[in-house]
Image: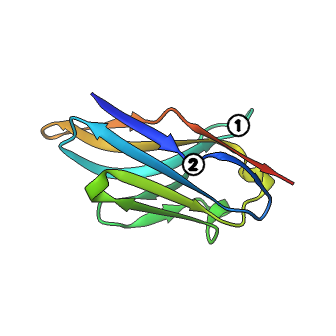
Amino acid sequence: QVQLVESGGGLVQAGGSLRLSCAASGSILSINAMGWYRQAPGKQRELVAGITNGGSTNYADSVKGRLTISRDNAKNTVYLQMNSLKPEDTAVYYCAADIEVVPGILSDYWGQGTQVTVSS
């Protein structure tokens, strides 16, 4: 069984910073891509940032230059450093990962979500 546990959300003023962490644990053979998604009230879940196991990254246009994704493969952990936060960044943030539990088969796993609220 695999678990993704997020931490680091909270309330911050506009212009402030937060750092989210997501640690994967369980019967993990390997982890391929990892990413952060968010879902604001009344909106669809959207990709915020992704990172491959080789370190290549991609970002939503709305967060480029403000949010940075990174990972520690030894710790099976992905991070999201969020700077210059705006009220429109308010959402529940979810981490996701493509994880090999059964040899040769990658499956998607999701965290439970962490609330980020940016006040104006």
Q: Amino acid at mark 2?
A: Gly
Q: Using the image as rendered, state which of residue 5 and residue 63 is in the foreground.
A: 5
Q: Which residue is mark 1?
A: 43
Q: Image quarter for residue 29?
A: top left
Q: Using the image as rendered, state which of residue 9 and residue 47 is in the foreground.
A: 9
Q: Using the image as rendered, state which of residue 38 and residue 20 is in the foreground.
A: 20
Q: Is residue 64 left or right of residue 105?
A: right
Q: Secondary structure under badge 1? A: loop
Q: Position of residue 18 (x, y in %)?
A: 63, 57
| Vertical arrangement, residue 66 with respect to residue 118, above or below | below
Dot 2: few (<14), some (14–19), or many (≥20) neighbours within 10 Å? some
Q: Is residue 18 left or right of residue 78?
A: right
Q: Secondary structure under badge 2? A: loop
Which numbered disc, 1 or 2, marks the residue closer to the eye? 2
| Vertical arrangement, residue 70 with respect to residue 76, above or below | below
| Vertical arrangement, residue 5 with respect to residue 90, above or below | above
- Check if mark 1's residue and mark 2's residue have beta carbons within 8 Å: no
Residue located at (21% from left, 35% from top): 27
* Quadrant where the N terminus is found in the figure: top left
Please, which residue is most extreme toward the left here? Answer: 103
Q: Position of residue 23 (x, y in %)?
A: 39, 45
Q: Which residue is mark 2?
A: 8
Residue located at (49% from left, 42% from top): 6
Q: Position of residue 20 (x, y in %)?
A: 54, 52
Please, which residue is most extreme toward the top here? Answer: 1
Dot 1: few (<14), some (14–19), or many (≥20) neighbours within 10 Å? few
Residue 98: mark in rendering = none
